[in-house]
Amino acid sequence: MNTTILLAHAYGQSHVLELEQHILPKLAKSMARIQVKASGINPIDARRMTGELKHAALPQTFGTEFAGVIAEVEGNQTQWKVGDEVLSSGGAFTHATVIDVPVENLIQKPSNINWATAGTLAGVSQTAMTILNEMDPAQSLLIHGGSGGVGSILIQLAVNKGIHVVATASAKNQEHLQQLGAKAVVYGDGLTERLEAIHPEKFDVSIDMVGNEEATQASLKTVKSGGFMGTIAGRKLSSNKIKPVWVKRNPANLKYVVNGIAEGKIKWVVSREYPFEQAQQAYADILDGHTKGKSVLIFND
């Protein structure tokens, strides 16, 4: 079976991205072959493209999450069959028309969730659940850069647990944060003072999704002694008191969030959809930042 894969043979801006056709090898044991319908784009994908983050040798592939239809499945299992609609984290990559994925990663796509939504959930859901589990117990949470995908899910999960959440974002995304249940604060000069005004007590936990010095200093000044300060920004920070949070892939955690969205208990925004053929534009827009919700590549049959 053929697949078309998004590749980059060099580091740079989105013009380095190419679509290349490849022949897939025989399906390996404990794997499923997926006809991809949608695949979310995350900031880390664009940062790998530019070379800011270098996780693999060139040429590099992209994408960590997807939704699609099983086209072939290894024969020694009974849970899944050809034609099943599924979503999950990927294997080596997901920005491709056909991919091979470990069967153990898969969960069923609810029928009332569309492809664009389903294809954007695996990464943010498992990241948010990892953070929530690592910060427990906590009564208050500060999120730097809360309007993106992970922040949008984390705010709702935390609020549903009775945690008081304050989140920062640009001025245009303040209403979005409020609709999710957070107290919203505009980032920029004077951030620490605005945080202290809206939440005079010290925070139990802060999570940095931005990775800049402003967020670092605000956390150091507003989180209680002994409180947890974490980051998923993937950038070197000026303080080693702020610890990186490494995502733990867990299909049960993914299913928990997906079911919440299917049942209308968790809000989710897919802000931008792009045909796979417009991947260059999609990645360029990701680099511009200031996202609300997620961007997704859509694959035609």
Image (cartoon, rainbow, N blue to C red):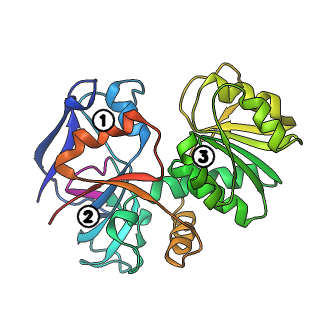
Q: Are marks 3 and 1 in contact (CB under 8 Å)?
A: no
Q: Is residue 248 visible?
A: no
**Distance between the alpha carbons at the discs numbered 3 and 2:** 28 Å
Q: What is the crowding at mark 1: few (fewer than 14 residues within 10 Å), some, or many (at least 20)? A: some
Region in magenta: 93-100
Of 213 and 192, which appears nearest the observer? 192
Q: Label 2 belongs to which residue?
A: 37
Along the horizontal axis of the image, is 16 left or right of 260? left
Against 252, residue 150 (above or below) is above
Q: Which residue is mark 3?
A: 146
Residue 6, can we see it?
Answer: yes
Q: Nearer the viewer, residue 44 or 174?
A: 174
**What secondary structure is found at the residue carrying circle 3?**
loop
Disc 2 versus disc 1: nearer the observer: 1
The amino acid on which the numbered mark 3 sits, given as a three-letter code, is: Gly
Q: Can you tell which quarter of the image residue 68 is in?
A: bottom left
Using the image, tell me which numbered label, if any, was put on residue 284. 1
- Tell me if label 3 and label 2 are in contact, CB under 8 Å: no
